[in-house]
Image (cartoon, rainbow, N blue to C red):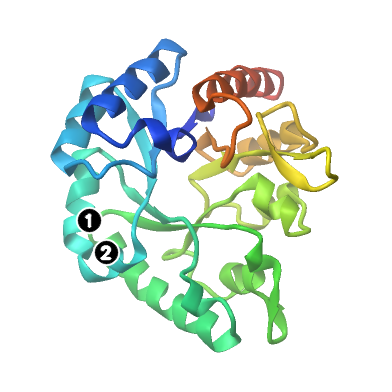
Amino acid sequence: MSIKLGAQLFTLRDYIKTYEDTEKTFAYLNSIGINVIQISGIGPIEPEKVAYLVDKYNMDVCVTHTSFDRMLAETETVVKEHKMMHCDTLGIGAMPDKYRDSEEGVREFIKLTDELGRKLRDLGAQFAYHNHSFEFRKVGEKRIIDMLIEDTDHDNFNFILDTYWVQHGGGNPVDYIEKIAGRMKVCHFKDYKIGDDFAPTFAEVGTGNLNLDACYRACRDTGVGYIVIEQDICEIDPRESMAISYENLKKIAERNKG
């Protein structure tokens, strides 16, 4: 089965603040051929209204970024909201700051997510973690990313790997896609380039330095179901950026379909 391609709405966050703007954005995505989305950075809009737009525009919501505090405190309510959108995967954008600075903090986060992941599975959903580059720091004897991979329950802790942030942290995205084989439903494709000041920055998919063809093949070979485009900062209109990235991602998919 081929990987489904789509958009991480965080890229278009300025255009999904109200119900009316979100409807226009969904219509725009449909117009350029996208009906797979990750919901992040939206609203505030009532969940029922978001679910209505999801159905109206035939959107496949593969994952969200959801408040970790809400997941912990209102687990059943959050799962119900996701089921209205036909989504079974609840992601967080990053580990909250208070857990990042020590081995003890990371272990406390792992304990909380294990309990949360078990509860979500009982409710027919799953937990997924999106990385940045801070996870490539060591706390104690191990890097945070290795603790998250090696010291978590594979059934309760899944990943939304971000290709840019792995590279930014000094890792090889292909290696990490392979390391978490079987634990990733959705991968973020985000390209990486060196700017005029020689600092790394974001780029439209297919226009930067990452070997996204190899990343795609690794996703294909490890059973990833979805790839969504995310670009934190765009130098052009984010909607135009998304269209460029989507066309290039389709070409990557076509030449690496196996």
In-front residue for pair 105/225: 105
Task: For marks 2 and 1, give the one nearer the viewer.
Answer: 2
The percent coordinates of residue 94 (x first, y second) are 50, 61
- According to the picture, the residue beneath numbered tag 2 turns out to be 70
Q: Is residue 132 left or right of residue 66?
A: right
What's the residue at 49%, 67% (across, down)? 95
Amino acid type shown at disc 2: Arg
The percent coordinates of residue 228 (x first, y second) are 52, 35
Is residue 184 shown to the viewer in this render? yes
In-front residue for pair 119/63: 63
What's the residue at 60%, 52% (across, down)? 181
At numbered mark 2, what does the secondary structure look like: helix, strand or loop? helix
Q: Say which mark, if any, is on residue 78.
A: 1
Amino acid type shown at disc 1: Val
What's the residue at 30%, 61% (across, down)? 121
**Label 2: how many Cα within 10 Å (few below 14, some 14–19, many 20+):** few
Q: In which quarter of the view is residue 171 placed?
A: bottom right
Q: Is residue 13 left or right of residue 141?
A: left
Label 1 near label 2: C-beta < 8 Å? yes
Is residue 1 shown to the viewer in this render? no
Q: Along the polypeptide, which appears first: circle 2 or circle 1?
A: 2
Q: In which quarter of the view is residue 119 placed?
A: bottom left
